[in-house]
């Protein structure tokens, strides 16, 4: 584990300087009614308003813009059924290079259309990890495109960490920040930024109770694979990589979980009280608060709303 190069605050600051002109500075919102419910000053960092509707554009744009001209000339490639696919496709289009995306053939139509709309060349495959990886390798062998992993990528993690840098510029200090944990890029980048700035804020990861491999890994000190459970928070089914596991165990303060019913309730609460659309993965931190997994009474707490991509033909509640 010691041989893995971990990002530093300087790396994240360089990423922020690189991508600042292409990303949205997303708003930090509050809701008086929700604050009263929990007796806390809750701030919501709205990455659902980021380009492609998710924080993933930060990491994707940093990775794509970091490529040399020689590397970029052959395009970029990845496998993804969700936000990372759209993020890579848009980042590539903005740089004027090709993107090659491998998507499972059972991906939601809304996501297929989004990725195609950003100009990606899509190759469909069977909905298994092995099929995704072998199909992607064939695409890379044919095109020579650079592979950008959704989270097991140094530049991607640095890009995700810019969310926390931006946040501190916007609201200053706070007591706690909660980031969803799937592959760990957002949580790892957040922890690196917050601890690198020397803030005393607690950095907490949040994931579904029935997909708690990150918490188990954090508590045992051993990297444990994804349980592949059908949580409604589909963006958080992924397991940590060695890179993100190393960052989170080194810099995060805790990982908490939330049940499925609480995740649905938290999403409804945001939709109904704040009038904004968020996806299930985005609200796991709020759901954990609802289940009293964290003591937030009287504290200034930031919850990163990681994305807002929901298939409105099949609403999640």
Image (cartoon, rainbow, N blue to C red):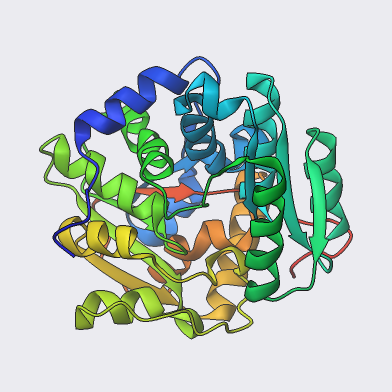
Q: Position of residue 119 (x, y in %)?
A: 81, 33
The front one of 132 and 236 is 132
The image quadrant where one finds the N terminus is bottom left
Relative to 37, residue 85 above or below: above
Find the residue positioned furthest to the front.
Answer: 141
Q: Position of residue 236 (x, y in %)?
A: 53, 67
Residue 170 visible in rendering: no
The image quadrant where one finds the C terminus is bottom right
The front one of 53 and 241 is 241
Task: Please give left or right for residue 182 compared with residue 166 in the image.
Answer: right
Q: Please name the residue shown 22% across and 48% down the image.
A: 6
Task: Please give left or right for residue 202 compared with residue 210 in the image.
Answer: left
Q: Position of residue 14 (x, y in %)?
A: 31, 23
The front one of 301 and 64 is 64
Q: Please name the residue shown 68% across and 25% down the image.
A: 97
The front one of 35 and 282 is 282
Q: Please name the residue shown 48% across and 79% down the image.
A: 226
Q: Kindly indicate the quadrant of the structure image that contains residue 249.
A: bottom left
The number of numbered discs placed on residues in the rendered structure image is 0
């Amino acid at each position: 584990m010691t041989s893995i190069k971990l990002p530093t605050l300087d790396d994240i600051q360089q990423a922020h300087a690189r991508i600042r002109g292409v990303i949205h500075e997303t708003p930090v919102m509050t809701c008086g009614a929700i604050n009263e419910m929990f007796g806390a000053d809750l701030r919501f960092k709205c990455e659902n308003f980021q380009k492609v509707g998710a924080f993933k554009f930060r990491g994707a744009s940093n990775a794509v813009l970091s490529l040399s001209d020689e590397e970029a000339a052959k395009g970029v490639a990845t496998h993804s059924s969700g936000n990372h696919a759209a993020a890579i496709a848009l980042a590539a289009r903005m740089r004027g290079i090709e993107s090659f995306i491998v998507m499972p053939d059972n991906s939601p139509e809304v996501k297929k259309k989004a990725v195609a709309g950003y100009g990606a060349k899509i190759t469909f495959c069977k909905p298994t990890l092995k099929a995704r990886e072998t199909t992607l390798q064939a695409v890379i062998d044919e095109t020579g495109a650079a592979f950008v992993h959704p989270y097991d990528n140094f530049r991607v993690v640095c890009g995700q960490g810019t969310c926390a840098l931006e946040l501190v510029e916007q609201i200053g200090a706070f007591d706690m920040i909660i980031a969803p944990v799937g592959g760990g890029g957002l949580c790892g980048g957040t922890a690196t930024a917050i601890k690198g700035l020397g803030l005393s804020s607690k950095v907490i990861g949040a994931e579904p109770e029935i997909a708690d491999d990150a918490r188990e890994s954090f508590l045992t000190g051993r990297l444990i694979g994804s349980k592949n459970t059908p949580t409604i928070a589909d963006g958080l089914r992924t397991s940590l990589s060695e890179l993100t596991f190393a960052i989170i165990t080194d810099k995060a303060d805790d990982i908490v979980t939330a049940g499925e019913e609480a995740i649905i309730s938290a999403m409804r609460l945001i939709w109904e009280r704040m009038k904004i659309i968020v996806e299930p993965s985005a609200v796991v931190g709020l759901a954990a608060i609802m289940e009293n997994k964290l003591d937030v009474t009287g504290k200034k707490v930031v919850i990163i709303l990681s994305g807002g991509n929901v298939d409105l033909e099949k609403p999640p509640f």
